Image: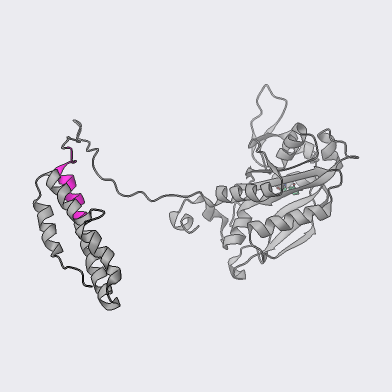
Amino acid sequence: MTTQTYDWLSYAARIGECTSADTLAGIDHELFGRKAGLLTIALKELGTLPAEERRRKAVELNEAKRTLSEAIALRHKTLGNPSGEQLKSEDGIDSSMELPPLSPGHLHLIPEFIRNVEEVFGRMGFDVMTGPEIETEDLNFNLLNIPPEHPARDAQDTFWIQQPATSNQKFVLRTHTSPVQIRYMQSHTPPFRAIFPGKVYRKDADATHSPMFHQFEGLMIGKDINLANMKAVMITAIRELIDKTAEFRFRTGYFPFVEPGLEVDMRWQGEESESREGKWLEIVGCGLVHPNVLKNCNIDADQWQGFAFGFGIERMIMIKHRIPDLRSFYEGDLRFLKQF
Ligand code: DAH
């Protein structure tokens, strides 16, 4: 079967000469009508042609389709809308003018990752809570077993906020999400399991540190929650959030609010020379919640025990997507953001 041949270009001329919106709508229908449009039919019949001819004809028809639909749209604009209504308002704004197409956006890598974290931990039965970014000294430090003279404060002794005259508390931009553990324990009765994602602030700035970054904290308290449960949760989270074959290692670490404390490092998955911190990056601190912390939240440490952890979100994403410089997350460069 051969398709009928039309002189498509003559339609372009007719469109250009069109003086009424009705005639234009008629030509539009003649060409593109859903059932009987000439181009619609010709395109449908392509499938019945022998391969060689089909290829040649497809190029010709698609070209005609593009040229003619553009010509119709253009003529449409010059003629005004089909009802003939004047769309230019008195102040000269043409509300019928076509705008350039919008390209749909998507979530930034970080909130997208946090949603994924909530989903993965949600499946393991974890609740989600968030806390304020301006925290009291008590919640950020003291109740977490970090008293003022403790050396562990040094690394996090950062953005203090002027103390309001009416308050006996000092305020700080929270240096970790750990204070949300305290807030959660003070407002819930064990057993429980929950995660706390959000922004935190420190004074470092280089390729692997930023003055603002994201963490998610986790907490699981019960009658007999132990280190083995903690490792199982950590390993599941890393495999689900980064990838099934991710390489990581546990080593001992010190944090005043846990005993014992552990750190988990992940292996950089790209070229080693691209990583600014060598082949292992620390991504999480964790351990069994210190009895003093439980006591500070009025939880009986003889009856209840469990673990806590704090993941660095940017670092996990850096490993997942082999992003060598953490600053790329915040530069707002679309060439970077559109890749994900
Ligand atoms: N808050 C720690 C930090 O920012 C991370 C951390 C370590 C959180 C051990 C924990 C934990 O909950 O148990 O460096």
- What residue do we see at 50% from left, 49% from top? 107
- Residue 71's place in the image compared with 61, above or below, is above
| Residue in the foreground of this view, choosing between 84 and 98 | 84
Q: Nearer the viewer, residue 85 or 195?
A: 85
Which residue occupies the extreme top position in the image?
166
Residue at 13 percent across and 65 percent down: it is 7
Residue 16, compared with residue 63, is above or below; it is: above
Dominant SS in magenta? helix
Vertical relation: 27 (above or below) 94: below
Q: Position of residue 91 (x, y in %)?
A: 20, 31
The quadrant holding residue 98 is top left
Numbered range of the magenta stretch: 69-83
Quadrant housing the N terminus: bottom left
Residue 75 part of the magenta segment: yes
Q: Quadrant of residue 232?
A: bottom right
Mark yes or no: residue 230 visible: yes
Is residue 211 visible to the viewer in this orientation of the structure? no
Q: Is residue 26 magenta?
A: no
Quadrant assignment, res 156: top right
**Residue 125 in the image, given as x and y percentages of width and height:** 71, 46
x, y percent for residue 132: 64, 35
Question: Viewer-proximal residue, 188 or 68?
Answer: 68
Q: Residue at x 56, y 47 (%)?
A: 111
